[in-house]
Amino acid sequence: ALVVAALGVAIASLVFNILIYSNQVNTSPVPAPNFAACPTPDPSTLPAAPPTPGNDARRITTESPVTSAVSDDKEIPDDQKITTPDSPDPSTDSTPPPSSDDGTETDPHNHLVPPPYTGPVSDNPAWKEAANRILATANLSVDPCDDFYQFTCGNYLQNTELEDGASRKATSDEAQYQINLGLANYFDSKKLRDLNSKTEQYQKIFLDICVADGKSTTDSAGRKAKWADLSKDLDKYLGFPLFGKDAVNKNRDEIFTAMGKMERQFTGGPLFTSIVTSDYKDSKKNALYINQPALRFDRDIYVKPQNSDKLDEYATEIRDLLLVYGHQTGRKINHNLWCPEPDRLNDVQCAQQIAEKTVNFERSLAMASWPDTELRNYQQQYSAVYTNLVLFYYDYQSLRLDNYVRALIDMPAEDSNLNGFKVVLAQPTYFAALEGMFGVNTIQNNDLTNYLAIHFLMENAAEYGIDIPSIDEINNRKEATTKSKSARYNTRRGHGARRIRRPPLNSNGLAANDRDALRASCIDTLIDYMPFGPGFTFVNNRAYRDEVRMDVEKQADNIFVQI
């Protein structure tokens, strides 16, 4: 905590020094605000807090990106270094830490009155550019005691326009785009055989496939071919009783085995989600955490009645997907089995009925789950730990988690001992509720197979180059190609035991051309699948990597000396 606080002070000091320098180099000075100590406000005169924006709020933010990666100490050839347009060289900057005239300590509590700065100012062009960016963002005509947000971000808010269809834009997006583009340029400059790290080899393969798929044709024949590939995998692992394709898995054991295999090979966890991360009680080892699912929406959307319109839209999206799937594959909905009522003989009405049943089942899963605010006690979530798959059967006879885990981690069918590897059920009460739902046999195998098949289509269509359509947005649903409205499963799930999420990057509003937008977007998708891989590559090959690290260490040491 002390290190984090020290780094925070160091960053604040750096920003202030940049502002001092920029005021010296600017020919048109900006009116300086009054930095006198702010008076204590009368609580009765404070304005009411603004309303919290909803999911559809268009907002501009100024948060900073955080990149975490581990790198080793080694000399990096110049041709392998990743650079971005804003890469100041710390080795050319000789600016010493600020000090007062008389050498006395400044009162740490008098933070509103900046101490005089008498040291030399860096003449590095990169620092000047950074200072100009800060001045272009801040509105120095505003007194920070009155409105600190406008003081720091006012000009950015006023001068930034959102692209069509964008709901947000942030300085962190601009920085993340430069990082993504730098990574794409790095991989484009390398052949696969030139990359010694398996991590980097996997990233390059993914990037090449993603870019090639993004450039592929989207005519009618191309879409049918992609739907055929998607249906082939669906038929292999599940089947689709709704469309007359018999369920491949005939009992509960086989269904849960198929769920483990599909999550291992594809993506998505319709009933629960799994992730391998560090063991909570032994950070030197990994553990498999199984948690409640990453549903389409947050829990409140499902359980609070004022959000019913969002669930209606969601059901419409599922209906549209089923209709286009039937057209593209030439398969018909089995009305006699799934929609026997006379008024359900119409495909649209029958698909709507199935979609509503799907959403209602998801609502029951959400009601059995816990809100994220109740999932912050990781010690409490570490209560159900399994070291042998046989123990799952004694606790959950209906769920068959033993079959699921065995298929997920690719264990032999006759083996049950995890050999020291731990499986943690992070939310036992959710699994107890799920056990009750399956234990009373209210969920038939064909119903569960249809539910899994629908989610397989929704979560994997984009990976096959297929956009989820909407017949309400285009007259001819057979040729619909509109994009999915939902974040990817891996984005919704997040990474790590805390399931950390991040907003997807909208490259279209930042890129100079379509090619750069596609490559940056592919890197963004790669981050969802390998959260630490791109960060490792970026830091490991970063120009001035060691100099930047030493500079941070030096600033931290200076702060500790003052403390």
Image: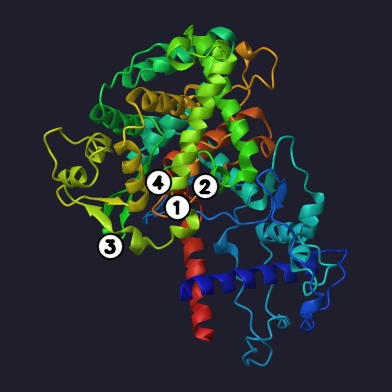
Q: Are marks 1 and 3 in contact (CB under 8 Å)?
A: no
Q: CA separation, marks 1 and 3?
A: 23 Å
Going 43% across and 16% down the picture, which residue do you hit? 242
Give the amino acid type for the residue marked by disc 1 in the picture: Trp
Q: Position of residue 446 (x, y in %)?
A: 36, 22
Q: How far is mark 2 from mark 1, CA to CA?
A: 8 Å
Judged from the image, the secondary structure of the residue bearing numbered disc 2 is helix
The foreground one among 253 and 410 is 253
Q: Amino acid at mark 3?
A: Lys
Q: Foreground mark, 1 or 4?
A: 1
In terms of secondary structure, where does tag 4 sit? loop
| Image position, residue 376 (x, y; %) | 44, 61
Give the mark nearer the N terminus: 2 vs 1: 2
- As displayed, is residue 118 above or below residue 447? below
Q: Earlier in the sequence, mark 3 or mark 4?
A: 3
| Residue denoted by label 2 | 299
Q: CA distance from mark 3 to mark 4?
A: 21 Å
Contact check, label 2 and label 1, Cβ < 8 Å: yes
Compare marks 1 and 4 and give the one earlier in the sequence.
4
Query: In the rendered structure, are the residues bearing label 3 and label 2 in contact, judged by CB atoms less than 8 Å apart?
Result: no
In terms of depth relative to the viewer, which is nearer, 93 or 471? 471
Q: Which residue is mark 1?
A: 370
Look at mark 3 in the image and give the residue it sits on. 281
Q: What is the distance, in whole Å, between disc 2 and disc 4 at their CAs?
A: 11 Å
Q: Nearer the viewer, mark 3 or mark 4?
A: 4
In the displayed structure, does residue 468 sit left or right of residue 227?
A: right
Q: CA distance from mark 1 to mark 4?
A: 8 Å
Left or right of residue 176: residue 203: left
